[in-house]
Amino acid sequence: MTDDFDLKQKVAKEAATLLYYGAEKEFKQAKLKAAKTLGSHFLPSNLEIAFEIDKIAEENEGGKREERLIQMRKEALEVMKNLADFSPVLIGSVWRGTIKQESDVDIAAYAEDTEEVLNILKSEGVDISKTAWITVNKQGATLESFHIYAKTPSGNSLEIVLRSQEEARKKRKCETFGDELKGLTIEALQKILQTNPAQKFTPS
């Protein structure tokens, strides 16, 4: 059992390395490639790989990583304040506290009028590069969302996902960590920045 566990850990670390350095984009492909490379039939969970990515990022980026995380959270807060009427929530790696070099600021908001949101962002000087409607199928349901791609003042990538107001009441499961995708509201993010600005939100 110990050998199996060790091999599974090695596969998780190899998959994490592939994802961190951009050799693979999807967890499924990364773990399959890592398992093949190491001759293993044992596949780690997305959670196990995510923790390994976090370790690699910490080893490679050091103290600058924490500084960047705090900066990204502060920039997220400013955008969220502009979208206060649309129940904005900080999600993704900036919420989790597990950013790596290529991470962007991910914000979910809920609105029926996408033009209204775009006009607010433009009036606040947000540097929007493109927008797109994206449709995904999950558990037999078709979900449509409007994605706004932009840059923060410091040059970090920013993605705002607009969903219908009805979606705001639905719980979502995180495909990477397996827990509920809660995120941080404006009030929660303000509190974190005051008390523990680099706090992580990952399953223990």
Image (spheres, rainbow, N blue to C red):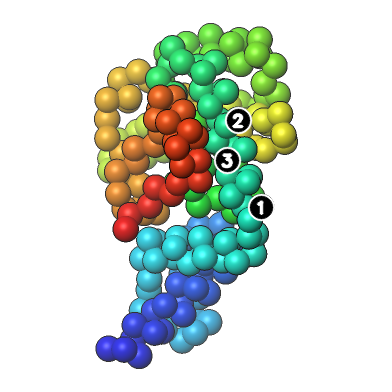
Element on which disc 3 rests: helix
Q: Using the image as rendered, state which of residue 63 and residue 201 is in the foreground.
A: 63
Q: Is residue 197 visible?
A: yes
All told, the count of numbered labels is 3
Residues packed near mark 1 inside 10 Å, few (<14), some (14 to 19) or many (20 plus)? few
Kindly identify which numbered label has been placed on residue 75: 2
Q: Amino acid at mark 2?
A: Glu
Q: Quadrant of residue 112?
A: top left
Q: Which residue is mark 1?
A: 64
Q: Amino acid at mark 1?
A: Lys
Going 60% across and 66% down the picture, which residue do you hit? 59
Going 29% across and 43% down the picture, which residue do you hit? 180
Q: CA distance from mark 1 to mark 2?
A: 16 Å
Relative side of 111 to 120, left or right: left
Going 62% across and 52% down the picture, which residue do you hit? 65
Quarter holding the N terminus? Answer: bottom left
Above or below for 23 versus 156: below
Q: Using the image as rendered, state which of residue 30 and residue 201 is in the foreground.
A: 201
Element on which disc 2 rests: helix
Going 40% across and 24% down the picture, which residue do you hit? 187
Kindly identify which numbered label has been placed on residue 70: 3
Element on which disc 1 rests: helix
Give the x, y percent position of residue 148: 58, 27
Q: Amino acid at mark 3?
A: Ile
- Image depth: mark 1 or mark 2 in front: 1
Give the x, y percent position of residue 80: 51, 22
Whichever of callouts 1 and 2 sits on the residue coming sooner in the sequence is 1
- Image depth: mark 2 or mark 3 in front: 3
Residues packed near mark 3 inside 10 Å, few (<14), some (14 to 19) or many (20 plus)? some
